[in-house]
């Protein structure tokens, strides 16, 4: 009873879809253990699951994933080995971590050694990978290898459907299943300290089985994966191939990897009698005899031997376990860094990391670190920005602790990959305690500095980033060819992260601002930095001008910039939604204030111009007051004479504080924003009018003559609404605006304002409806015909015959007429 209860608790906990519970089980008493084992072993040779095992169904997504893998025509099947070795290494890291607080978990003898052994059975085509890691309990086997789909499973499936690269499987946390690229049957034997030894097995046909292991030798602790190689994967049944793969992909695994391999060695064996006799009766001449005599003299001292070749089998160590970060950076080659990056980031693309930094920090807190900038941003870097974790691997005195510490890097640098190994942090405390440790703050500070220096170095080494210097040295140019355009690439991949940094990291704001790049009115096709902008500023220019909007082309034509551009000022174009937040946080750079060209407080013009402007303003006093009253219901705070316009009659600007038109648009697009807050945050609107524009001048005259002039009122409203649209605002009442436009159209066409719209014949309404219905049906038919005819048309064209399109257009016209 108790046992049954325990079992049901376990099942409930696991919630696994179990099938064919112990079918085919042999009734006890009719057979012996030895017979069962024999029969099972036979069944393995035909690769069928053990009858007595509990059978489970793979979780649906996992099953789909395995289908894709097993049927994959993907040529690079090599990846399976590094994925399994990486899993073994993770398992070893886990047990080593536990052993910090409890030495006894390691056990004794061979079991206490932390390593990986790879062995081949060439005849049976079975490849075995064994580790002395943490192992898996029965529950772990069921959950981890089949019934729990990780978040990465669906993301990986999605990528595969889009034609993604199977090579990236490890980045999605489903690497184990890549074993089915080379196997049609896999057994996993595992022993965890808390459970008995179990066998997991599957042929990737939707099911897997788990059974207590009574047939194999005890593992002590750890996991052994037995890969029954497919016919077409026989190349992996070669030691040389395995040796090559481990060296290529798993060189930086921090545990020894051994391969059971054969070697031809020279062995001295006693020479046999017959051969000696032959030697003695050979050649008869004196010189030979002399030699023989000498030999004989020798032979008396030493027993007769010969050298033969013998095949010896032994464990061969494949990797050097010395961690790269412990070595002197001067002794590590760029190729080694590249390889280390690929294994660390599980990024096995052919692209090299963009840059790296390797350093020792000394002082109160000592640590060694290697940081990398990946060649490209991960697929979900900005999609899941706030839930992403900065995954630096943390080691304490060479022992892997965690790759889930958020405390090591700020979010905006979460795109970096790397490791940190600290001698200062304590070893024998829990992860939670470690997370609170005061040294982490110092480590983080130093890592951020070093990371920003590394990014800065890309800029410094990129010839495209040089300005104001004339680089003529050919050698230099050649050396930097690889670095050319690198920062632009970095910016494309990670520019948004730098902007997020400016928003989130006030301490490093200035350093980060140096890394910003923009398009501007003077940057042409390339990007400009703030330093470049400042170097081009006009004499006396105190502000950095920018404008925000949806796209560069639109901004280039913006009425807000007319005067600024005419006068030769450079304007930065900001087109990403995040830029609105960026400019709220970055208000000045090198003592120059940022100025939004669409805001009310834009000041341009010389002293002379200012005095003249005062006179102009005075002459428009009456019109601006009249106009403001007219727009009383439109939330317009004031109407002003503009300094920024050249050819446009008017624009609507917003007050310095409060949202720009672009920000209003961004906020409206956000589902969760509270509309009442929107009204509150909306910048106050100011209509600016162009005092030299004929429409505005004419209005001034009309209003001076008659302030109640209805036409003038309509035109003034229309100018305001048009200015709103052109300034990027969304009209609150488009209908009102449309009515006004049509009334202007009427007067342009000399249509009387009283001319009425022709009445519809109401009595025919019903009939028309019917007609409409039939004509719609006809249209549908027509459309079908149209399609057919289109197809024909292609055929006609291909065959070089008469194009029937003319005839078709006629029938289309007919349909319109009928409608
Ligand atoms: N050799 C092993 N020893 C112990 N547990 C293992 C071993 N191999 C796999 N596992 C368990 O199975 C799980 C699934 O492995 P899988 O390779 O699919 O994903 P992962 O290791 O989490 O991620 P990745 O693919 O990035 O290595 C692992 O998380 C681990 O818990």
Image (cartoon, grey):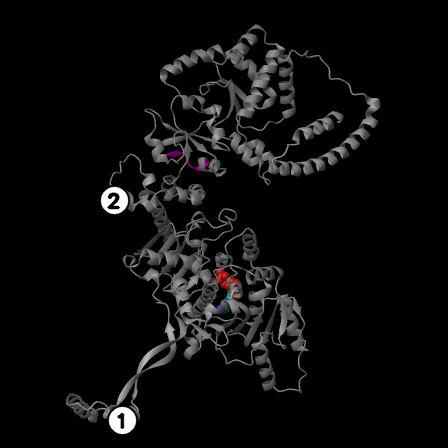
Where's residue 561, x and y in %? 45, 24
Where's residue 438, x and y in %? 39, 56
Does label 2 or label 1 sit earlier along the sequence? 1
**Residue tagged 1:** 277
* Figure quadrant of residue 252: bottom left
> What span is colored magenta in the figure?
584-590
User: Foreground residue, 513 or 293?
Assistant: 293
The residue located at (55%, 33%) in the rendering is 665
State whether residue 765 appears in this view. Answer: yes
**Residue 812 sits inside the magenta stretch:** no
Where's residue 796, x and y in %? 63, 36
SS class, disc 2: helix
Which quadrant: the N terminus?
A: bottom right
**Residue tagged 2:** 475
Answer few, some or many: residues within 10 Å of disc 2's Cα (few below 14, many 20 plus, some between 14 and 19): few
Residue labelled 1 has its Cβ within 8 Å of some atom of ligand 1:
no
Q: In the image, is 276 to the left or to the right of 76? A: left
Query: Where 39 falls versus 181 (above or below)?
Result: below
Question: Nearer the viewer's eye, disc 2 or disc 1?
Answer: 1
Q: Are marks 2 and 1 in contact (CB under 8 Å)?
A: no
The residue located at (32%, 62%) in the rendering is 326
The CA span between labels 2 and 1 is 73 Å
State whether residue 590 appears in this view. Answer: no
Count numbered badges in the picture. 2
Answer few, some or many: residues within 10 Å of disc 1's Cα (few below 14, many 20 plus, some between 14 and 19): few
Which quadrant: the C terminus?
A: top right
SS class, disc 1: helix
Q: In the image, is 578 to the left or to the right of 438? A: right
Residue labelled 2 has its Cβ within 8 Å of some atom of ligand 1:
no
User: Foreground residue, 656 or 804?
Assistant: 804
Residue occupying the far top of the picture: 705
């Amino acid at each position: 009873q108790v046992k049954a209860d325990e079992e049901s608790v376990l099942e409930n906990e696991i919630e696994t879809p179990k099938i064919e519970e112990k079918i085919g089980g042999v009734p006890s008493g009719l057979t012996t253990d030895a017979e069962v084992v024999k029969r099972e072993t036979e069944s393995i040779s035909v690769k069928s699951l053990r009858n007595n095992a509990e059978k489970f169904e793979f979780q649906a997504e996992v099953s789909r994933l395995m289908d894709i893998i097993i049927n994959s025509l993907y040529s690079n099947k090599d990846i399976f080995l590094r994925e399994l070795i990486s899993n073994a290494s993770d398992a070893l890291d886990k047990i080593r971590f536990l052993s910090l607080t409890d030495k006894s978990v390691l056990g004794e003898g061979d079991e206490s050694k932390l390593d990986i052994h790879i062995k081949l059975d060439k005849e049976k085509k079975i490849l075995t990978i064994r580790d002395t890691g943490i192992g898996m309990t029965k529950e772990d086997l069921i959950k981890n290898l089949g019934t729990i789909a990780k978040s990465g499973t669906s993301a990986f499936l999605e990528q595969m459907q889009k034609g993604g690269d199977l090579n990236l499987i490890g980045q999605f946390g489903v690497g184990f299943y890549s074993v089915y690229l080379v196997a049609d049957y896999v057994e996993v034997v595992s022993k965890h300290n808390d459970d008995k030894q179990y066998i997991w097995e599957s042929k990737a046909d939707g099911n897997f089985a788990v059974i207590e292991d009574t047939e194999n030798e005890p593992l002590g602790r750890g996991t052994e994966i037995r890969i029954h190689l497919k016919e077409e994967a026989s190349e992996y049944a070669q030691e040389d191939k395995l040796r090559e793969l481990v060296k290529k992909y798993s060189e930086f695994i921090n545990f020894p990897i051994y391969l059971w391999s054969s070697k031809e060695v020279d062995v001295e064996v006693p020479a046999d009698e017959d051969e000696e006799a032959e030697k003695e009766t050979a050649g008869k001449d004196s010189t030979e005899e002399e030699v023989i005599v000498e030999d004989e003299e020798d032979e008396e001292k030493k027993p007769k031997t010969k050298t033969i070749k013998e095949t010896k089998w032994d464990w061969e160590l494949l990797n050097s376990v010395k961690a790269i970060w412990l070595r002197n950076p001067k002794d590590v080659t760029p190729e080694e860094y590249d390889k280390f990056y690929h294994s660390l980031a599980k990024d096995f693309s052919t692209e090299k990391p963009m840059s790296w930094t390797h350093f020792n920090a000394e002082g109160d807190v000592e640590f060694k670190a290697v940081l990398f900038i990946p060649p490209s941003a991960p697929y979900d870097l900005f999609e899941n920005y706030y839930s992403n974790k900065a995954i630096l691997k943390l080691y304490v005195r060479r022992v892997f602790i965690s790759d889930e510490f958020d405390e090591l890097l700020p979010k905006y640098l979460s795109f970096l990959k790397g490791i940190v190994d600290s001698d200062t942090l304590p070893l024998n405390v829990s992860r939670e305690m470690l997370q609170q440790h005061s040294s982490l703050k110092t480590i983080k500070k130093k890592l951020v500095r070093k990371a920003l220096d590394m990014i800065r170095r890309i800029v410094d080494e990129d010839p495209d980033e040089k300005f104001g210097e004339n680089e003529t040295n050919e050698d230099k140019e050649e050396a930097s060819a690889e670095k050319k355009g690198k920062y632009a690439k970095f910016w494309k991949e990670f520019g948004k992260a730098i902007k997020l940094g400016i928003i989130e990291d006030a301490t490093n704001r200035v350093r980060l601002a140096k890394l910003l790049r923009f398009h501007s009115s003077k940057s042409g096709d390339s990007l400009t930095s703030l330093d470049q902008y400042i170097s081009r500023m006009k004499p006396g220019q105190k502000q950095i001008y920018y404008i925000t909007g949806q796209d560069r082309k639109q901004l280039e034509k913006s009425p807000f910039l007319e005067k600024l551009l005419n006068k030769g000022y450079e304007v930065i174009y900001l087109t990403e939604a995040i830029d609105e937040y960026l400019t709220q946080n970055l208000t000045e750079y090198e003592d120059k204030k940022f100025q939004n060209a669409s805001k009310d407080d834009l000041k341009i013009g010389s002293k002379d111009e200012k005095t003249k402007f005062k006179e102009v303003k005075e002459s428009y006093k009456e019109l601006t007051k009249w106009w403001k009253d007219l727009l009383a219901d439109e939330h317009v705070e004031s109407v002003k004479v503009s300094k920024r316009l050249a050819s446009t009659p008017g624009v609507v600007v917003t007050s310095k504080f409060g949202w720009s038109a672009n920000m209003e648009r961004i906020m409206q697009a956000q589902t969760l924003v509270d509309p009442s807050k929107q009204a509150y945050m909306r910048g106050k609107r100011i209509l600016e009018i162009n005092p030299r524009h004929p429409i505005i001048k004419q209005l001034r005259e009309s209003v001076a003559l008659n302030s109640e002039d209805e036409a003038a009122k309509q035109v003034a409203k229309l100018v305001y609404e048009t200015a709103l649209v052109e300034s990027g605002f969304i009209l609150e009442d488009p209908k009102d605006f449309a009515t006004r436009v049509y009334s202007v159209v009427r007067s342009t066409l000399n249509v009387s304002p009283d001319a009425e719209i022709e009445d519809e014949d109401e009595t025919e309404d019903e009939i028309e409806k019917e007609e409409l219905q039939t004509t719609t049906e006809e249209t549908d038919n027509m459309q079908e015909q149209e399609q057919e005819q289109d197809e024909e048309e292609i055929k006609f064209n291909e065959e070089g015959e008469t194009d029937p399109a003319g005839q078709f257009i006629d029938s289309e016209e007919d349909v319109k007429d009928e409608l």
